[in-house]
Amino acid sequence: MLGAASSKVPRWFGPDRQPLQGGYAAGSDRNLWPAEGQQGVTWHVSTDQPLVALTFDDGPGPNYTPLVLDTLDKYDAPATFFMVGERLAEHHKLVEGRLGRHEVGNHTWSHADLSEQDFDGVTRQLKRTHDAIVTYTGRVPRLLRPPWGHLGGSTLLAANALGYDVVLWSYQMHEKRYAQNPQAQISDIVTKSRPGEIILAHDYGDQQRLVALGHLGPMIEGLRARGMKLVTVSELLAAGRVRPPKGP
């Protein structure tokens, strides 16, 4: 039985269940050890360069994906889209020929909670989406973002087996908070983003998304006015891995 000190469940789980199936133990008998003994999760990249990455989850969808792509085209700004496989299969024509400067990541096939999945379940979600991304975009995704940021050890093992880096986020659009004040949402992103920031937004969902998506242009302008450069997540990761040579 769990002791009192270890029985507290994270608030996103109900009191009647714990994320046991998606825990490390559920996949550890697979002997799928992370390469070189390491399998990390990235929220933020440590870099001295003034780089930030815009990311968009849950699409593509007809309501907002074209709006986002139009705005990014207008400002010649790159982004990383974490796509849901079944939505890509249904709406792939929305992104056809429009992803030139952008990056595509895996966000599961059905927006599943991977913390509830065992190794085989996670693998099925990721492989089906991987194949859809290759088929419809011609890209080979190397980044995984689990929906809601929920993951267990089986997710890390499956990601490692499939060659994925797991990427979460360090800051996000707060559409509910700024529902009646879009200018405050702009200011929040522009003034609080730091070098190495991974910013979360969504190009799928209800009309609340427009608080952020309808004002991407001013956000991009404001970030650039501060000297920030927009890059894809992979570019940001690469910038964090490069270290300047040490002096004598």
Image: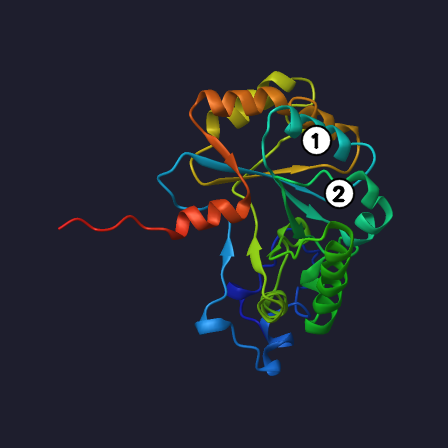
Amino acid type, label 2: Gly
Residue drawn at x 46%, y 20% is 225
For marks 1 and 2, the one nearer the N-term is 2
Q: Position of residue 73 (x, y in %)?
A: 66, 28
Quadrant of res 56: top right
Left or right side of 81 for 111: right
Residue drawn at x 60%, y 71% is 161
Q: Position of residue 97 (x, y in %)?
A: 74, 40
| Mark 1–mark 2 CB contact (< 8 Å) | yes
Amino acid type, label 1: Val
How many residues crowd mark 2 within 10 Å: few (<14), some (14–19), many (20+)?
Answer: many
Q: Residue furthest left?
A: 248
The residue at which mark 1 appears reads as 68
User: Count of labels shown?
Assistant: 2
Q: Position of residue 169 (x, y in %)?
A: 55, 45
Q: Residue furthest right?
A: 90
Kind of element beneath mark 1: helix
Left or right side of 82 for 195: left
User: Along the line of sight, which residue is nearer the eye, 66 or 107?
Assistant: 66
Quadrant of res 162: bottom right
The residue at which mark 2 appears reads as 59
